[in-house]
Image (cartoon, grey):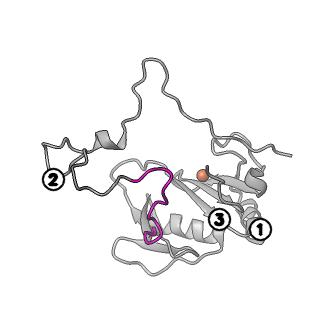
Amino acid sequence: MHEGYSRPRREPEAGQRPAPSSASLLPAPTQGAFRTEPETGDPPLMSSHQPYPHAGVQLNHTAVYASDRHLSAEFLAAILGLRVGAPFGPFLPVDLGNGVTLDYCEKRDEPIQPQHYAFLVADGQFDAVIARLEAVGVTYYADPGHTDPGRVNDLFGGRGAYFADPDGHNMEVMTRPYARP
Ligand SMILES: [Fe+2]
């Protein structure tokens, strides 16, 4: 039985610059309209102990770059049991069950930077996804680094697997969402 894996936390190594904080990514207070320091009368800053007001914000769509939008959209739709929608300008949409649309669009003039997309599916759908991958000869892996082929993981009491799309995007299918702290 695969033991699953744990994501190592990245700590800056000696001599390595630490990742910039969000505050350091903002313009300096004197350089623009943004202020990084609170002023008298500002509402209190959010703390980690307060609920973040995220309920009204939902991901609606994102662009997925592809060297051939039809090939990539049809590939994902076929593997996940979805449908490719009608072209919308440069985009070829694949609608997901939670209202998010993946808008496939082509980028031919420069290399495509592989991204990671994870899809939560029911147990029965997971079996179907694995069967489709095997049927078309696409290797799936238990780990995101693609070192454990032909196996699935058991993260968070569920099952999961990774596979590459035609442009190398690292696709993940999982039956349990990550249990985040
Ligand atoms: Fe993931």
Vertical side of 11 occupied by 36: above or below: below
Question: Where residue 92 sits in the image (x, y, percent)?
Answer: 44, 73
- Amino acid type at circle 1 is Asp
Residue with the most extreme front position: 41
**Residue neighbourhood size for the residue with mark 1, other residues' Cα within 10 Å, grouped as few (<14), some (14–19), many (≥20):** some
Q: Position of residue 83 (x, y in %)?
A: 57, 78
Q: Earlier in the sequence, mark 1 or mark 2?
A: 2
Q: Position of residue 140 (x, y in %)?
A: 70, 52
Q: Is residue 22 left or right of residue 127?
A: left
Q: Nearer the viewer, mark 1 or mark 2?
A: 2
Judged from the image, the secondary structure of the residue bearing numbered disc 2 is loop
Q: Residues within 10 Å of mark 3 (few under 14, many from 20)?
A: some
Residue 123: image tag? 1
Considering only vertical position in the picture, is 57 above or below 20?
Answer: below
* Disc 1 secondary structure class: helix
Q: Which residue bears the numbered disc 3?
A: 120
Mark number displayed over residue 33: 2
User: Which residues lie in the magenta part?
Assistant: 46-59
Above or below, 116 against 56 in this view is above
Q: Quadrant of residue 21?
A: top left
Q: Where in the figure is residue 155, as x and y percent of width and height?
A: 74, 51
Identity of the residue drawn at 69% across and 39% down: 147
Residue at x 49% of width, y 60% of height: 51
Name the residue nearer the viewer: 68 or 124. 124
